[in-house]
Amino acid sequence: MIKSCVIGWPISHSRSPLIHGYWLKKFGIEGSYERIPVEPEKLPAFLHSLADNGFAGCNVTLPHKEQAFRLVTPADEPTERLGAVNTVFVKDGKVLGTNTDGEGFINSLRAGAPALGIRNSRVIVLGAGGAAVAITNALLLNGAGEVVVANRSIDKAENLRKRFGNRVKPLEWTKRNDQLSECELLVNTTSLGMKGQEDLQIDLTMLAPKAVVTDIVYVPLRTKLLAAAAARGNPVVEGLGMLLHQAVRGFELWFGVRPAVTIELHDLIARDIDPGYKT
């Protein structure tokens, strides 16, 4: 039996077992995927004993992504550039790590807003944390002309410019509303708007009617940002799509089959998040 898991501290909130369990059942694979809480100080021992404990690999979530990068062998150049790992797999006796957050974001965006052209577009990214790093990198790799990064700490936004070059434009958080008029894509990568967190304060008045708005927050399924954007007619892409699409490559690496993100899977996870969800 092939085993995989998701690790974090805490980890009880993760929907990953439901996603991978759905695919295991769909493909008739004899395998398992579980949640395992791992304290930060125990992460090195856990990762280095993956194969010995019968695991083909694991997903890595907060707060372990950067520490995991330092503990495993990066599997590809984009992961080297990001300095963070969310997917670990064992191959030829080596523990390798990759990052699927960026491709998960792009594939979710393509599925949810197929009319959006990323090449040469002007994007505003709210936040400058780990998710913003992966998303900014993916947008640039897909040809975005300019990525404006607005963050409460301008130094963190400036770090993204230093990392990725002059197509990244740091922006003071207080000026985020003033830059919306020429924006073709607005991305919230902060936790603002998540259940239990403060709301994201932003005025969409200047946002172009065709601009796409997306949020990586998926609890609630539709944040106040997305509801406000949809109410004024803007195309919106919910955060659940990124969660689903970033899981695809990990499943393929561990179980040898590349799954698809389907409406059935989306609705299964949506109902787990919100029992009152209806298609």
Image (cartoon, rainbow, N blue to C red):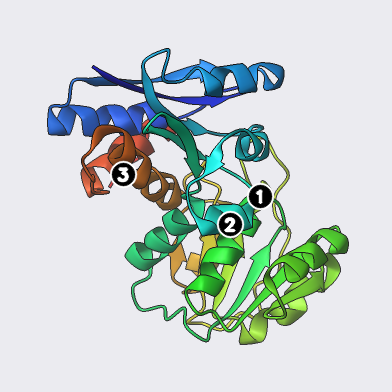
Up-down: is 168 above or below 55?
Answer: below
Q: Which mark is residue 130?
A: 1
Q: Nearer the viewer, residue 38 or 270?
A: 38
Please give the residue where the numbered disc 2 appears in the rendered image: 134
The image quarter containing residue 215 is bottom right
What residue lies at 63% left-to-right and 87% top-to-bottom?
Answer: 182
Estimate the spatial distance between the alpha carbons at disc 1 and disc 2, rounded to whole Å: 6 Å
Estimate the spatial distance between the alpha carbons at disc 3 and disc 2, rounded to whole Å: 23 Å
The three-letter code of the residue at mark 3 reads His
Q: Nearer the viewer, residue 26 or 212?
A: 26
Estimate the spatial distance between the alpha carbons at disc 3 and disc 1, rounded to whole Å: 24 Å
Please give the residue where the numbered disc 3 appears in the rendered image: 266
- Locate residue 175 relative to residue 187 in the image: left or right: right
Up-down: is 105 above or below 75?
Answer: below
What residue lies at 87% left-to-right and 62% top-to-bottom?
Answer: 155
Q: Residues within 10 Å of mark 2 (few under 14, many from 20)?
A: many
What residue lies at 62% left-to-right and 38% top-to-bottom?
Answer: 65
